[in-house]
Amino acid sequence: MHDPLRTRTRHLDLGCGGVPRNPYQRDELHGIDIAAPAAAPGVTLRQANLALQPIPYPDAMFDSVSAYDFFEHVPRLLPTSDGLGTRFPFIELMDEIWRVLRAGGLLYAQTPAYPHPAAFQDPTHVNFIAADTHHYFSRPQLTARMYGFRGDFLVRRVQRIKPGQAYHPQHEGWLERWRERARARRGALSHLVWELEAVKDAPLAR
């Protein structure tokens, strides 16, 4: 459970490589990568294969989690270790993200998305995100419940973007909306941004 007396904020960057990102400028920065990350001053780095292993942190530790060009590398389906069943690594990862976020904590993800070629051209992309994929993990649909998903998110925003910034803020002005429409016409909006808020203290109405 989140400690109300804790004053330092914490962020976790998934698939961080050698340069973990801190989009919300939290006090502490942690990163996880499948390869052993090189040491970075002032950053806590851990190694884990998040398609097979849980996030190696306790419950409700983080104020925010980010995933830049990472979700597309997480398989949707794998056989169980005995070969007799199936498991859903992406759904399990979304559960893990929810678990390590405090109540009200934020997930920020940038992912190449269908139907843009960027979603398919890299041969290591195995998880294709579409405009409505977030419905599986967010209210009111929470469609992934049928596959064992236990988490609960609210949508802050889902938006197509042209990537290239550590954090892509939401712009409400007419000029920025016009620019986004122009980029969309040029096919430049290759990625989806998810900003989802972890719900931990309000049961879903049935």
Image (tube, rainbow, N blue to C red):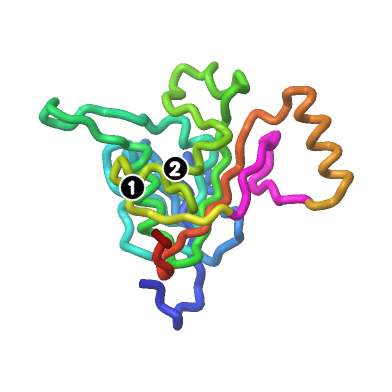
Say if 158 sits above or below 58 in the image: above
Amino acid type assigned to the residue bearing label 1 in the image: Phe
Say if 49 sits above or below 137 in the image: above
Q: Secondary structure at mark 2?
A: helix
The answer to whether any part of residue 192 appears in the image is: yes
User: How many residues crowd around disc 1 within 10 Å: few (fewer than 14), some, or many (20 or more)?
Assistant: some
Question: Would you say the magenta stretch is mainly helix, strand or loop?
Answer: loop
Residue 82 painted magenta: no
Q: Residue at x 45, y 67 (%)?
A: 103
- Residue identified by numbered label 1: 149
Marks 1 and 2, how far apart at CA? 9 Å
Q: Residue furthest bottom?
A: 5
Q: Nearer the viewer, residue 118 or 173?
A: 173
Precedes in sequence: disc 1 or disc 2: 2
Q: Residue furthest front?
A: 206
- Residue identified by numbered label 2: 136
Residue 107 x %, y %: 51, 52
Q: Residue at x 60, y 22 (%)?
A: 115
User: How many residues crowd around disc 2 within 10 Å: few (fewer than 14), some, or many (20 or more)?
Assistant: some
Residue 49 x %, y %: 32, 38
Compared across the picture, whether 162 is left or right of 6 comes to right
How many numbered callouts?
Answer: 2
Q: Residue at x 29, y 45 (%)?
A: 148
Say if 75 sits above or below 31 in the image: above
Q: Which residues are magenta?
A: 156-171
Amino acid type assigned to the residue bearing label 2 in the image: Tyr
